[in-house]
Image (tube, grey):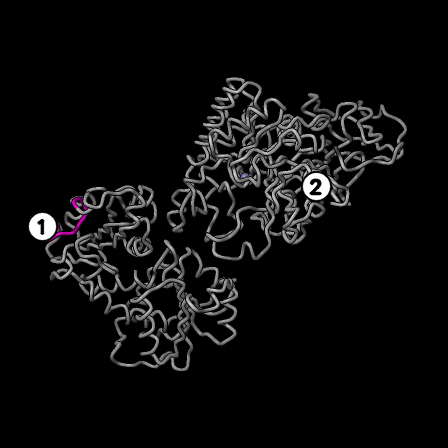
Amino acid sequence: MGNHKSKSGSSLLIKGGHLIDPAARIDAPMDILLKDGRVAEVAAPNQIKGADEKFDARGLIVAPGFIDLHVHLREPGQVYKETIATGTAAAAAGGFTSVCIMPNTAPVVDSPEWVHWLREPERGAQVSVFPIAAATLASKGAILTDFRALQRAGAIAVTDDGKPILDDDIMREALTRGAELNLPIVQHAEDVRMTENCAMHAGAKSFRLGLRGMTAAAEASVVERDVHLAMQIAKSRYHVAHLSTADALKAVRRGKRANARVTCEVTPHHFSLTDEDVGDYDTNYKMNPPLRSASDLEAILAALADGTVDAIATDHAPHAAHDKEIEFERAAFGITGLETALALAITKLHREKRMPLARVVELFTAGPARCFDLRGRGSLGRGCHADVTIFDPKKKWIFERAKSLSKSRNTPFDGWKLTGRVVATIVSGKIVYPA
Amino acid sequence: MNPARGSLLGIEHLDTAEILKILKFARRMNPDKPRPLLKGKRVVLLFYEASTRTRSSFEIAAKVMGAHTVLIQSAGSSIEKGESLLDTGYTLRAVGADIIVIRHPNAGAPLVMAQHIDVPVINAGDGLHEHPSQALLDAYTILRNKKSFKGLQVSIVGDIFHSRVARSACHLLGKFGVKVILCGPPELVPDIAATIAPGVRVTRHLEDALRGTDVIMLLRVQKERLAGMQIDLPDYISRYQMTTARLKMAKKDAIVLHPGPIIRGLELTSEIADGAQTRILDEVHNGVPTRMAILARAVGRMR
Ligand SMILES: [Zn+2]
């Protein structure tokens, strides 16, 4: 499904690096030969001879190409915020070789035609693009889309992201039809009846700022209902997008313990920041779900470590300055995230919380690949797609949003001192970053 | 960009010395004796929300000090046509505004304006956030009736959640070590309200709030809001309405404040509204010298 084809016959040898491939249980020095867009060989150092090109990976971690399950690229319709070309360039800079893109565009991607359109070469994607289609027509929550036709066209999951699938009957029917097709239903868990006019998390900070707050219950109640349904409907697949609360994690654990096919993702900002960081109405800290309490953040850190969380996903949500430089309550929700995700994971999870690098890599590779069944990705076994992310886990750097490859600048991480930086991103055997 | 010197965006980030300076200067201001500290200055009153007392109070204060005032209200202006807050700000700066007094339905809007426009911005009430000039005039009124803030207890009764007056009052009184008691049902006074400033606590019982208190601040209860929150109005009245009998639980010399407009028969009885301990009209009166001080401070003339 990738959009890139390497020249037939060309081969690339990645030499001298330390391979972390959690799906293959490898965490050792290894050389890797990429050929014809696939992994041709993985062997101990200096065993592989003869390649058209070599990449010197000494001192670096070599990992399967990162997969981002949750990206807004704003095409069609909002190209002033981002395009597939600019968004995927930012993805490549952040080490992502595959991005799953959200359907809440203008128009909403609710037809096979739009799914095809997203995957056309004319879009100029720098990495592999996997459309997630709308679960209901125009994401209005009322009438289910044609899952089978969308899946045939290339959709890997369905969601009404930006909004929840709220109606009990619609959700039950979506999970049932998804089960027949082995198609994950991705939920933006927010009971919008409880969050009207809310701009941030409900807590001491929102009270102080005079902002109406979204309660943790508005998220958790939806996840609880959905997990309950997923446990009832055989073979159904349910994925919680950008999970942000301790109570929602409890529901996910319950589902996993019951062997329901329940998965979830967490964003870098939800494991790095809390509601107190909103400061004095800084709209670069306004997103949905909102930054939560310190105890929610603690629960997320524990769940990332213990395996409850399956993937780190950015919820990259670019917005133009005029969408953000306005009254906090009227400002758009969302921040960019593709270029800071790995560094935040290394800085906040690996260095501060001692999470093993192999687990960090798993959350960007094998974990997300399993959530949406991305075959031949998220691992570097022989025959897998030649998607590779090479990074320096010790490199200290300062993120400057002015240098971002995204069209938008709405990030709270400008000027942050981070550790861990992408050195090269390879898609289908071709180096796409640095360009 | 940092807000221009002289801006007044809230009480939270003001220190006690600055507050006392404003109050001291206000005491020297007399609305009946013109002081041309703002002579030739343009004061823009930018009101995105209807207001009678705050707007007229600022307007009189500005005029007494010799300023030209320009009133811009959302109805009939470019605001109504969808102009952004910042574009309005740039326009006002371009026409030579020396001070922008802004009231806005969204919390934090005056700060957005102040961060982008190098003109002093005065918050005349922003959403549920702050209403600093009201807190200052209430402090002024309290100090006209009490020797100092030392050892005082102030009880605020009513819809705290929706009240920018309450938030500003908590910040101001908390800075001076005043004991603040917030009183009302959980829907209007969430427990989390106690975290807003040091020395603030929450109670559900009016007797608890009134016993031995020096100042009672009543807040307006909006019927439509109560309906939306499914609060029983008769029940609210029976539990929280200020009556002559209840006022006796407070200290003998306790005073009653209310930012207005009042609703007789709801948060207070007519006897209380017109009673000897009530200072509601004093508050209105004290609004002008307080706002004169705030405007003088905005142009660096509070000396
Ligand atoms: Zn979402």
Q: Chain of mark 1?
A: B
Q: Is residue A305 visible?
A: no
Q: Nearer the viewer, residue B19 or A1?
A: A1
SS of the residue at dot 1? helix
Looking at the image, residue A395 sits to the left or right of residue B124; the answer is right
| Distance from the alpha carbon under mark 1 to that under mark 2 | 72 Å
Residue type highlighted by circle 2: Leu
Circle 1 Cα neighbour tier, 10 Å, few/some/many (<14 / 14–19 / ≥20): few
Looking at the image, residue A196 sits to the left or right of residue B65; the answer is right
Q: Nearer the viewer, residue B237 or A349?
A: B237
Q: Provide residue A290's location: percent of width, then percent of height.
A: 48, 42
Residue named by callout 1: B245
Quadrant housing the C terminus of chain A: top right
Residue type highlighted by circle 1: Ala
Q: Residue at x 31, y 75 (%)?
A: B60
Quadrant housing the N terminus of chain A: top right
Residue named by callout 2: A118
Looking at the image, residue B134 sits to the left or right of residue B85; the answer is left
* Residues shaded magenta: B238-246
